[in-house]
Image (cartoon, rainbow, N blue to C red):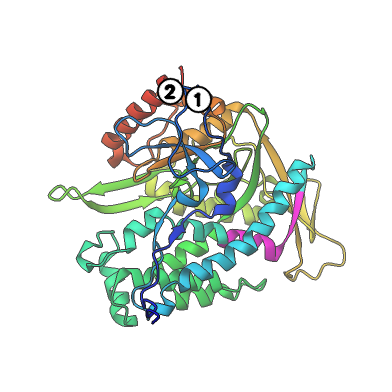
């Protein structure tokens, strides 16, 4: 007599940062020798299994540990859509897996050309747009947004857009905030970002308005730059909230009665997407000057207007970026050339955008100072973060020492509400540095 199969799916560990990215930070695990008293054997790890060095900030006294790639930066049934019939509850995970497969091929191309020593890599418009979409979804699917939307009780939704979101839910027939989250992920992932940019209207009509505008801003008001380390001893770190981190001004106001967030305004100057310890995509805001574009007075005036609206009126004209002097620039393309410092169309060009237009991305080599400054932003924005992942212990200690000893006016606090938490994390990081011999 055979037993009937269970109607409930088995629990599944689902990553919010894809394994193909985590493997770039991984090494083959090697169990310690019996006489090696300086290393402990990690539970659940097998010889040569891909593992990452990391510290767990939830621990009172964190220490460097090794964790298998398959069991970090995720959670069990993370994208389980309980509003669907049981056979369909993993439709979001399947959708994200298809997107990851497409994105991983482009990231592999970027890594391959860098490994060959090339100074640049070209991507088609479709490839560039897929990367733009993928990076936003990495942000939107991550731990910060999961904590915002994924609640069994609607009363637990506490974000500042509560009234607007619940109004949208009533209009669209959604029962839970998580229903909106899953709907938006599906909308963004399946969006065809056509060269004529009709997608902007579609995403505004189909997704929750505030987050649709966020998607448009993230993909259209920032440009991609590929940064590499100049000194082989330097490395970029990865935190579990890296893709939710930005560098820029922020005004956060707490309700004096509840202590909860009552109002929030921010401007993202830079965002960060580590590819590996040696490569990182940086997204830079359109408010920064692009000389060959600003040679056109109309473009320069438009940029000045957006700087005024996005920054000056909200945060003051004296507002500056911590990474203003980051040595990056916009990618060149196949349909324009720079002549006498100004952009000109390629002879014979009809001005139409095409899916196979090419964009030439340089690898910008960053010195130790800029690598440390970017890592400092990631260290300094660990609210809600549990893990810090890194390639080599030696490089991690170098950048951690820089962060812990930098003058206070160098390191910028992104959100003024997190000072107490920040102090706790800094104390934990100082303890880790001491353990590593600092």
Q: Nearer the viewer, residue 265 or 274?
A: 274
Q: Is residue 5 left or right of residue 333?
A: left
For this orientation, the residue located farthest to the top is 438
Q: Is residue 5 above or below residue 109?
A: below
Residues at circles 2 and 1 in contact by the CB criterion of under 8 Å: yes
The quarter of the rendered structure image containing the C terminus is top left
Q: Is residue 256 visible?
A: yes
Q: Nearer the viewer, residue 84 or 256?
A: 84
Where, by quadrant of the figure, is residue 198 drawn? bottom right
Q: Is residue 228 magenta?
A: no
Residue in view at x 47 percent, y 33 percent: 376
Q: Is residue 127 above or below residue 286?
A: below
Q: Is residue 139 left or right of residue 58?
A: right
Q: Which residue is mark 1?
A: 397
Q: Nearer the viewer, residue 74 or 329?
A: 74
Q: Label 2 to label 1, Cα distance in Å? A: 6 Å
- Residue 433's disc is 2
Q: Secondary structure at mark 1?
A: helix
Pointer 1 local density, CA inside 10 Å: few below 14, some 14–19, many at least 20? some
- The x, y position of residue 373, in whole percent, is 52, 32
Where does the magenta region start and end? 121-133
Pointer 2 local density, CA inside 10 Å: few below 14, some 14–19, many at least 20? some
Residue in view at x 59 percent, y 42 percent: 48
- The x, y position of residue 45, in whole percent, is 49, 43
The quarter of the rendered structure image containing the N terminus is bottom left
Q: Secondary structure at mark 2?
A: helix
Indicate which disc, 2 or 1, sits on the residue closer to the N terminus. Answer: 1
- The x, y position of residue 86, in whole percent, is 38, 78
Q: Main secondary structure of the magenta part?
A: helix
């Amino acid at each position: 007599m055979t037993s009937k199969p269970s109607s409930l799916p088995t629990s599944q560990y689902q990553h919010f940062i894809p394994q193909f990215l985590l493997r770039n930070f991984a090494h083959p695990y090697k169990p310690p020798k019996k006489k090696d008293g300086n290393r402990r054997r990690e539970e659940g790890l097998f010889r040569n299994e891909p593992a990452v060095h990391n510290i767990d900030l939830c621990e009172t006294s964190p220490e460097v540990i090794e964790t298998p790639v398959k069991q970090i930066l995720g959670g069990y049934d993370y994208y389980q859509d309980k509003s669907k019939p049981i056979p369909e509850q993993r439709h979001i995970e399947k959708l994200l897996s298809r997107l990851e497969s497409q994105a991983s091929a482009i990231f592999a191309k970027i890594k391959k050309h860098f490994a060959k020593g090339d100074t640049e890599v070209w991507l088609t418009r479709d490839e560039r747009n897929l990367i733009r979409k993928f990076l936003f979804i990495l942000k939107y699917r991550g731990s910060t947004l999961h904590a915002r939307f994924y609640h069994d009780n609607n009363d637990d939704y506490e974000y500042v857009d509560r009234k607007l979101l619940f109004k949208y839910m009533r209009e669209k027939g959604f029962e839970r905030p998580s229903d909106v989250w899953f709907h938006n992920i599906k909308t963004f992932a399946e969006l065809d970002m056509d060269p004529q940019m009709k997608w902007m209207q579609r995403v505004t009509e189909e997704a929750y308005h505030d987050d649709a505008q966020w998607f448009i801003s993230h993909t259209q008001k920032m440009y991609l730059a590929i940064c590499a380390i100049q000194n082989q001893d330097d490395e970029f770190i990865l935190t579990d909230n890296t893709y939710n981190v930005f560098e820029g001004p922020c005004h956060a106001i707490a309700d004096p009665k509840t202590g909860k967030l009552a109002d929030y305004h921010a401007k993202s100057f830079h965002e960060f997407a580590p590819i590996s310890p040696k490569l990182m995509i940086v997204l830079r805001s359109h408010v920064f000057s692009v000389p060959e574009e600003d040679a056109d007075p109309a473009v320069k005036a438009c940029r000045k207007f957006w700087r005024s609206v996005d920054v000056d009126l909200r945060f003051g004209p004296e507002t500056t970026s911590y990474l203003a002097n980051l040595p990056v620039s916009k990618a060149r393309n196949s349909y324009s050339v720079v002549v006498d410092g100004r952009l000109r169309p390629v002879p014979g060009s009809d001005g139409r955008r095409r899916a196979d237009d090419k964009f030439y991305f340089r690898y910008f080599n960053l010195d130790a100072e800029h690598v440390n400054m970017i890592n400092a932003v990631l260290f300094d924005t660990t609210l809600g973060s549990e893990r810090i992942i890194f390639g080599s212990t030696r490089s991690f200690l170098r950048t951690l020492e820089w962060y812990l000893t930098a003058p206070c006016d160098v390191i910028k606090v992104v959100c003024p509400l997190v000072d107490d938490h920040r102090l706790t994390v800094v104390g934990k990081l100082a303890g880790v540095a001491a353990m590593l011999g600092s």
